[in-house]
Image (tube, rainbow, N blue to C red):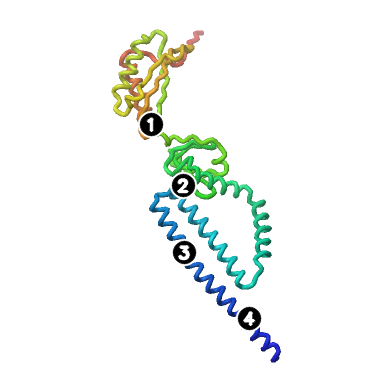
C-alpha cells in the first residue's frame, strides 16, 4: 500500500506542474485569441472590408489559432506532437475524401471572396438562376429573386461557372424590337419612336439612342431600338417605352401586326 502511495505522490509531483502549466497556457491562450480576433475584426471594419469576407477571415483565424493552441497544450502535457500530427493528417485525408464536394464549395467560397466577381447587393445570373446576392457564405451563396424567393447556389459550382453581373457597370442598354405593318411609313415610324424616347426623363442622352430598321419579317417591318439608362432605371424604362410606343402607334394609326382568327360559317 505504501508503495502505491509513494508512486501516486511521485506521479502527482511529476505531472501536476505540467497539467497546471497546460491549463494556464489554455486559459491565457483563449484570452489572447479573443483579443487577437477582436483586434483583427476592428481593423477589417475600419478598412471597410466586405462583410462576407470579414466573417470568413475571422472564422478562419479563430479556428486556426485554436488548433495551434490545442497542439501546444497537449505538447506541454507530454504527448508526442509528431504522432498527433500523423493522426491529424490521416484523419484529414479521410475527411477530405468523404467531403470532396464540401471542400470544393469551401475553395469556391475562398476564390469568390478573394477575387470578388460578385458582392452583396449585385444582381447576377448564374447556374440558370438570377437574383440579387443576399449573402456570401463559406460554402454557399444566397440569391433573392425578384419575386422574393431564396436560391442557394453551392460556391464550387458558382466559382467554376459563368457569372453575368448586371450591377458592375453604372449604365445598361435597353433593347426593343418594334414590328409594324408593311404599309406603314418607315420615316414616320422612326420619328414616332424617337419622339417617345426623347420625352422620357430617365433615358440618357449619351450614349445616343438608336432606331434602325433591322429586319423585313414575314408579316412585319421590325425596328431595332436601343437606349441607355442608369442600371437602377432599367425595368422602369423598359416597361414605360413599351407602353408609350404602343399608345403612340395607335394614335398615329400605325398597326402592329398580329394573328387574326378567321371564322367560316358553314350553311347547310
Q: Reply above or below: 217 against 122.
A: above
Residue at which label 1 appears = 171
| CA separation in Å, label 1 and label 3 | 44 Å
Query: Looking at the image, is mark 1 or mark 3 nearer the viewer?
Result: 3
Query: Looking at the image, is mark 3 or mark 2 nearer the viewer?
Result: 3
Q: Using the image, tell me which numbered label, if any, was put on residue 34.
A: 3
Residue drawn 40% across the image and 26% down it:
174
Helix, strand or loop for disc 3: helix
Mark 1 and mark 4 lie on one chain; the one further toward the N terminus is 4
| CA separation in Å, label 4 and label 2 | 53 Å
| CA separation in Å, label 3 and label 2 | 25 Å
Residue 221 in the image, given as x and y percentages of width and height:
43, 12
Mark 4 and mark 2 lie on one chain; the one further toward the N terminus is 4
Residue at which label 2 appears = 135
Label 3: few (<14), some (14–19) or many (≥20) C-alpha neighbours in 10 Å: few
Q: Using the image, tell me which numbered label, if any, was put on residue 14.
A: 4
Query: Looking at the image, is mark 1 or mark 4 nearer the viewer?
Result: 4
- Observer-nearest of 148 and 72: 72
Residue drawn 44% across the image and 57% down it:
40
- Observer-nearest of 260 and 111: 111
The quadrant in which residue 71 appears is bottom right
The quadrant in which residue 73 appears is bottom right
Amino acid at each position: 500500500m505504501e508503495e502505491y502511495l509513494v508512486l501516486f505522490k511521485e506521479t502527482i509531483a511529476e505531472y501536476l506542474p505540467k497539467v497546471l502549466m497546460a491549463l494556464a497556457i489554455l486559459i491565457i491562450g483563449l484570452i489572447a485569441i479573443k483579443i487577437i480576433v477582436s483586434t483583427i475584426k476592428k481593423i477589417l471594419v475600419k478598412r471597410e472590408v466586405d462583410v462576407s469576407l470579414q466573417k470568413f477571415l475571422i472564422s478562419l483565424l479563430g479556428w486556426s489559432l485554436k488548433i495551434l493552441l490545442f497542439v501546444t497544450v497537449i505538447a506541454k502535457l507530454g504527448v508526442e506532437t509528431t504522432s498527433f500530427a500523423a493522426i491529424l493528417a490521416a484523419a484529414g485525408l479521410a475527411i477530405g475524401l468523404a467531403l470532396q464536394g464540401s471542400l470544393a464549395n469551401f475553395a469556391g467560397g475562398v476564390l469568390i471572396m478573394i477575387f470578388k466577381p460578385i458582392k452583396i447587393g449585385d444582381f447576377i445570373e448564374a447556374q440558370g438562376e438570377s437574383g440579387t446576392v443576399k449573402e456570401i457564405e463559406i460554402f454557399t451563396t444566397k440569391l433573392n429573386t425578384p419575386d422574393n424567393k431564396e436560391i442557394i447556389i453551392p460556391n464550387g459550382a458558382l466559382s467554376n461557372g459563368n457569372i453575368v453581373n448586371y450591377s458592375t457597370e453604372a449604365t445598361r442598354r435597353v433593347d426593343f424590337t418594334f414590328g409594324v405593318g408593311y404599309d406603314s411609313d418607315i420615316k414616320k415610324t422612326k420619328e414616332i419612336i424617337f419622339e417617345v424616347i426623347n420625352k422620357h426623363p430617365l433615358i440618357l442622352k449619351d450614349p445616343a439612342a438608336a432606331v434602325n430598321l433591322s429586319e423585313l419579317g414575314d408579316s412585319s417591318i421590325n425596328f431595332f431600338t436601343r437606349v441607355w439608362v442608369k442600371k437602377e432605371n432599367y425595368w422602369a424604362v423598359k416597361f414605360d417605352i413599351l407602353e408609350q410606343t404602343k399608345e403612340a402607334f395607335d394614335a398615329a394609326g400605325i398597326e402592329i401586326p398580329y394573328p387574326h382568327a378567321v371564322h367560316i360559317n358553314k350553311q347547310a
